[in-house]
Image (cartoon, rainbow, N blue to C red):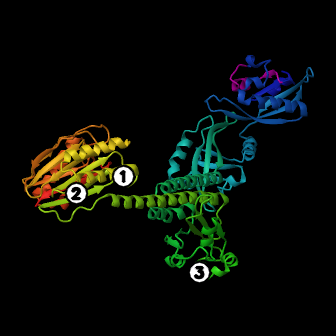
Amino acid sequence: MDASDELLRGSGPSALLTLDGAVHSINSTMASALGRTAEECLGRGFGDLYPASQRLSAESLVVAATRTKAVAMRVLEVPGQSGVPVACLLEARPVKDPVCGEELVWVHSLDAHNDLASLLIPFRLTAEAADLGLWMYSPQRDQLDWLGGAPALVALSPDLTTPLSRVISALHPDDREAFRQLLRSAPIEQSPWMRLRHLTPQDGWHQLALQTRRLQLGYGGPERIFGVLRDDTKQEKRKQKAQAALAAERQRAKDIADFSSVLITAASEQELQQVVLTRLAATFGASGVLFALDDGRLRCATDAGIAMREAQALHGLQLGHPSPLPEAIRTGKPLFVLDREDYIRRWPHGASLPWIDRLGSDYTLSITPLGETGNQPLGAWAMTYGSGYLPSLEERTLMGVLADLAGQALRRIRLQQARVELATALQQTMLPTLPEHLPGLEVAARYRPSRDGLDIGGDWYDAYVVPDGAIALEIGDVQGHDVDAAALMGQVRSSLRAIAAHEPHPGTVLTRTNELLTTMDVARFASCTLLHVDPRGGRVTGTSAGHVPSLCAHRDGSHGVRELPGGPVLGVVPGINYREEAFALDADTTLVMVTDGVVEGPGLTLDAGLERAGTLAAQAVHDGLNAEETADRILDAAVAVDHLDDVAVLVLRRT
């Protein structure tokens, strides 16, 4: 037996390698550990006999011993017979065959039972280098041994050996069962990271991440479960802070979008003021907001964050007053007041206002004028901040953008209000005043403009006494509902009156009116119904120019449709002779004349509309309502359902 046999004789895994790492000889224990026979190993590179993950470490072990001519050590893993990987502490040292003098490298596994600490040293070093913690769990003893690693993680447990029950008690109750399950089923490969919440007496909850793996320590050694621990507490706090900031930013972006949308759609100054007072301070994290409009003198309103007495003290100030709010409106430039001293330094003559009482040594005030570039601001809003807060440049820019939107909205609202007032005045001059006393007759009229466009339209009604003593009643509709329609409506109504003053027959009145309009070459047309009523006998003579039928409502609750002869709408076809018809209006009958907006709509056909209006009129007459109340009932029903067009109602009742 030569010297090489002596080196391989021990029960532990052992092999002799050439200086280039080839297997010179190997004992059966080592070959079996590598999953091969001794014959299969001879001549092959030592590193090639290991799994790919271990190959580099095996080769470096041989190189280290060869180059340094000294002992080298590495921890290597090989598959165990039970399926659990075996972690071996291998020693490599140079030797010389005494028989032939050949230089060799002797590699053998150290007995883990005698030097378990040495086997764990590489694990500790690796964990510490990776800023991780390392512990080992022994199922037989049901305890965890802390092996080292990052000092902060080792400090989570003051004792190096800790019973499993104590470790589990420090975990969050919701995480305990998952941790137990991980220990029971620890895989031979590294497990996925598991998140755990661990409570320490010193600094509260820690967010930990854990990986486990089952290993056998050396040939014939014990099985242990190793855990690698990472502390994600700071990372989680940063993540939560970032998520909170992102959520706050998203909420703020939504608030700003909502605020902008409501500004743009505000329909009145009161609505605009309400938007500013209820939303602005929250959008920018301010303590309070004050809203001031310029009508030659300030009109101020405030939210709950600014006292009413402060707003009232500013109310009525002229723009020339030496204080920041009038100055911002006057100059169109935003102002920022850092504190009380800054206020007094810049506006010493305005220091008597109660506003100065609000500014403490660390109070900030921002004032932003409302108006687009190039236009005189129509007002301003002021916001107060506590704790010396100064809005960022981005916030100031955004305030300016929103103030521009508010100024545009305010300008639009005031322009629209002026148009409405003009339209209302024009409409009032267009609509006639009905005669107060008509012998034997009761007449009532109602008008409501379209919901779209300018608040004026082309529908009209009229009632007047003609030279022969009859009462002329007319109702009509000029195409469209705008200023042009209203202008043509005035011309048609005036023409009808002028012609009726010399012509007693309704059909002839429409014929001559049509001739006048066709010669004028107007771009629009008009429909009309014209009646002459004899107040003594109730005889009615009527004609129609393409207008919707009239309704007859009776005291017994019945109703009917009265279609009159005539011709097409006025102003389109020349040379038309409009026919007329006479009928009697009984004392128990009410005649209702309407425009098409009352009886037609997107969801209402003409027949259905006439039936609805006739039913309403008949019920009103049956209930004993007078002409005024009957007109109200019909108009209200038309406005409530599908009211898009102008509507007019003219009610005639014999008394």
Residue 483 sits inside the magenta stretch: no
Q: Nearer the viewer, residue 450 or 221?
A: 450
> Is 103 drawn above or below residue 540 in the view shown?
above
Q: Left or right: 585 with respect to 411?
A: left
Q: Which residues are magenta?
A: 21-37
Residue 9 position in % (x across, y down): 78, 26
Point out the image quarter for the C terminus: bottom left
Q: Earlier in the sequence, mark 3 or mark 1?
A: 3
Q: Secondary structure at mark 3?
A: loop
Q: Amino acid at mark 2?
A: Ala
Could you tell me residue 578's position as x and y percent? 21, 41
Name the residue beneath numbered marker 3. 353
Q: Secondary structure at mark 2?
A: strand
User: In terms of sequence position, does the residue under pointer 2 or pointer 1 come before the other?
Assistant: 2
Q: Amino acid at mark 1?
A: Ala
Residue 26 shown in magenta: yes
Write the residue at 23% across / 47% down.
Answer: 509
Q: Farthest residue to the bottom: give it.
A: 352
Mark 1 crowd level (few <14, some 14–19, many ≥20, 10 Å Cα): many
